């Protein structure tokens, strides 16, 4: 079996590239969780979230600097940006709705850190204790929601795996390590797919 990382073909090397974003299992059961661009799999949720963050990095500072949004306006806006995410998760929304909610979540993440920053500036500059209260609330909502939603996402992914006929195998098609997967794909072309070492 192929051992040298340099001999792995480019599309297989993509599997072990640390910044490839596709951290889902690479099997058919998770095909709707990724975008396939020129044969490369990219995590759909991360792509949309980072796209939203990019948009947020442009829009949110403009709202603060030119529309004079204070931390209270940002706090209200944050709820409109964040609420579609848990709703789409728990209501089993269609994939396109999840994509949009992920983009809003990305904008919401930028809004979260902007809200905390603006609130703390208001607290330290003007002794505005409500600014400190809002900053603390926003921080804990962010941490708590991240943990809850991550756990729910993990539970759903595990349920998909547990319903698979390969669940429990030492080397299932989608969840073995990406390096082993890359080696296995190379070995497949050489007629020794996923052979034991």
Image: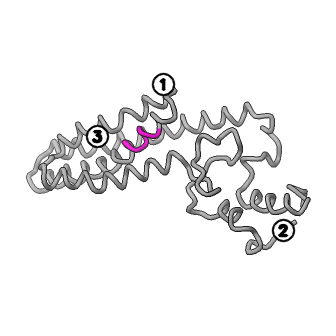
Q: Position of residue 65 (x, y in %)?
A: 15, 56
Query: Which residue lies at the image location 28% right of the left edge and 56% below the top edge?
Result: 58
Q: Position of residue 7 (x, y in %)?
A: 77, 73
For marks 1 and 3 on the same chain, the one whose residue lies earlier in the sequence: 3
CA separation in Å, label 1 and label 3: 20 Å
Disc 1 crowd rating (10 Å Cα; few below 14, some 14-19, many 20+) is few
Q: Which mark is residue 91?
A: 1
Q: Is 70 placed left or right of 44 in the picture?
A: left
CA separation in Å, label 1 and label 2: 45 Å
Q: Relative to the observer, which residue lies in front, 4 or 47?
A: 47
Q: Are marks 1 and 3 in contact (CB under 8 Å)?
A: no
Q: Identify the element where label 3 is drawn.
A: helix
Pair 2/3: label in front: 2
Q: Position of residue 137 (x, y in %)?
A: 28, 40
Residue pointed to by mark 3 = 78
Q: Is 151 placed left or right of 53 in the picture?
A: right
Q: Position of residue 147 (x, y in %)?
A: 47, 40
Q: Which residues are magenta?
A: 99-104
Residue pointed to by mark 2 = 2
Judge whether residue 149 is colored magenta.
no
């Amino acid at each position: 079996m192929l051992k040298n990382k340099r001999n792995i073909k480019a599309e297989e090397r993509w599997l072990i590239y640390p910044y490839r974003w596709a951290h889902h299992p690479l099997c058919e059961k998770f095909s709707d969780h990724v975008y396939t661009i020129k044969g490369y799999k990219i995590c759909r949720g991360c792509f949309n979230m980072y796209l939203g963050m990019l948009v947020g990095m442009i829009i949110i500072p403009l709202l603060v600097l030119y529309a004079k949004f204070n931390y209270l306006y940002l706090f209200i806006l944050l709820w409109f940006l964040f609420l579609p995410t848990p709703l789409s998760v728990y209501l089993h929304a269609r994939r396109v709705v999840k994509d949009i909610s992920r983009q809003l979540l990305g904008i919401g993440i930028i809004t979260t850190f902007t809200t905390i920053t603006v609130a703390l500036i208001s607290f330290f500059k003007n002794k505005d204790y409500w600014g400190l209260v809002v900053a603390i609330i926003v921080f804990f909502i962010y941490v708590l929601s991240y943990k809850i939603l991550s756990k729910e996402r993990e539970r759903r992914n595990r349920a998909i795996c547990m319903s698979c006929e390969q669940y429990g195998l030492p080397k299932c098609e989608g969840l073995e390590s990406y390096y082993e997967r890359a080696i296995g794909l190379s070995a497949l072309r050489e007629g020794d797919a996923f052979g034991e070492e």
